[in-house]
Structures are given as structure tokens and as C-alpha cells.
Amino acid sequence: MFKKILIVLALAIIALVVVIQRQPDEFTVTRSTVMDASPQAVYEQVNDLHQWQDWSPWAKLDPQATATFTGPATGEGSSFAWSGNNEVGEGKQTIVESRPGELVRFKLEFIRPFAGTNDVDFTFKPEGTGTRVTWTMSGKANFISKTMGLVMDCDKMCGDFFVQGLANLKAIVETAPKA
């Protein structure tokens, strides 16, 4: 009887590993909204990492988190490192490409609670009298993230933060004095 239980358990573990391995090797989370502001106005908020504390949903989760800025004040090479509670963790983001009024691209490195490196893009496209702002994060899905994806909807979890961040950013750029 004990031997049968072990065989069933081993088969269940093998089946679980197969299911996990068959999950996608990459992920993408994207959210967008239209803001009543010029592409340049929105770009300036995103391209200056010092401004992120005003609209990032993660900044609100741990107001006591430490923030360190290195490199130029804005644009390519500008970096922001943070360390906070378990909700915000620890990591660093660096602007790797910056095109005024069009794109800001980041390398996002997580240290804790889970190590990982992702790409993040903010794009700005004129739409009507405003700007469509799209926030996208993509990266590789390792075995642990594939396993977590079986029980958590990571797209919804991250996407909800993106929606909140975009709403916060929208409130800032729409109330700023127009140039």
C-alpha cells in the first residue's frame, strides 16, 4: 500500500513539473490610457526618476522605503534604486533609452523578494487632443515564476498597479500648467 502511495505521489509530482514547464517562457503585461496632455509633458514626468515618487503606486505601499538616485538627473543612464518593506522589495531601474515625447525604456532589476530582470517601456502617442500612454513590462519566466503563475494571475496583479500608476500620472499631467 505504501509503495502505491509513493508511486502515485511521484507521478503527481512529475505531472506538475510537466505542467509548469509547459507554461510560456516569457511574459508581457501592458496597460494604457489617454491623458489630456502633450506627449512631451508626459514624457518629462516618466523620464525623470525623481518624479516617480509622486505617481508610482509602489511608493505609496512603503513611504519609509529608501531611494537612491545615480547617474544623470534625467534620461539615459539615470538610475533609481529602492529598498523597502516586503510589499515593495528591493531593486533598481535604469533608463536605457530615451526619445523625447516618444519612449522611455528601462532595465528593471529585482533583488528581493524574488530576483529577476525585466524590460519596461513607456510609449507616448498623440491621440486626439491628448496622448495615449502605454506602460509595458516584459521578461523571461523562470521555473519559480511559472509555478507562481499557476496560482496567481500575475498579469492582473501587475496590471492593477499599472492602472493605478497611470491614473496617478494622469492626475499630475492633466493638472499641471500648460506650456
Image (cartoon, rainbow, N blue to C red):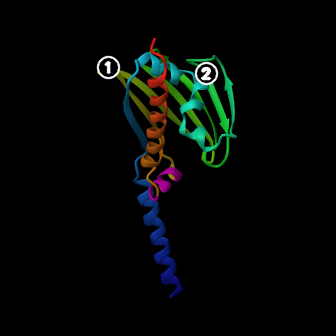
Amino acid type, callout 1: Thr
> Which residue is found at the position 49% from the left and 21% from the top?
176
> Which residue is found at the position 46% from the left and 77% from the top?
8
Amino acid type, callout 2: Ser
Whether residue 106 appears in this view of the structure is: yes
State whether residue 81 is above or below residue 43. Answer: below
Residue identifier under label 1: 129
Classify mark 2: helix, strand or loop: loop
Which range is magenta? 144-151
Per the image, is 13 magenta? no
Across the whole image, how many numbered discs are drawn on residues? 2
State whether residue 42 is above or below residue 114. Answer: above
Classify mark 1: helix, strand or loop: loop
Q: Nearer the viewer, residue 108 or 146?
A: 108
Mark 2 or mark 1, earlier in chain: 2
- Compared across the picture, whether 10 is left or right of 124 comes to right
> Which residue is found at the position 47% from the left and 60% from the top?
17
- Compared across the picture, whether 170 is left or right of 83 comes to left
What numbered label is drawn on residue 11?
none
Q: Which of 22 and 127 is in front in this view?
A: 127
Q: How crowded is mark 1: few (under 14 residues within 10 Å), some or many (20 or more)?
A: few
- Compared across the picture, whether 109 is left or right of 179 comes to right
Whether residue 139 appears in this view of the structure is: no
> Which residue is found at the position 59% from the left and 36% from the top?
109
Residue identifier under label 2: 78
Do the CB atoms of the residues marked 2 and 1 lie less than 8 Å apart? no
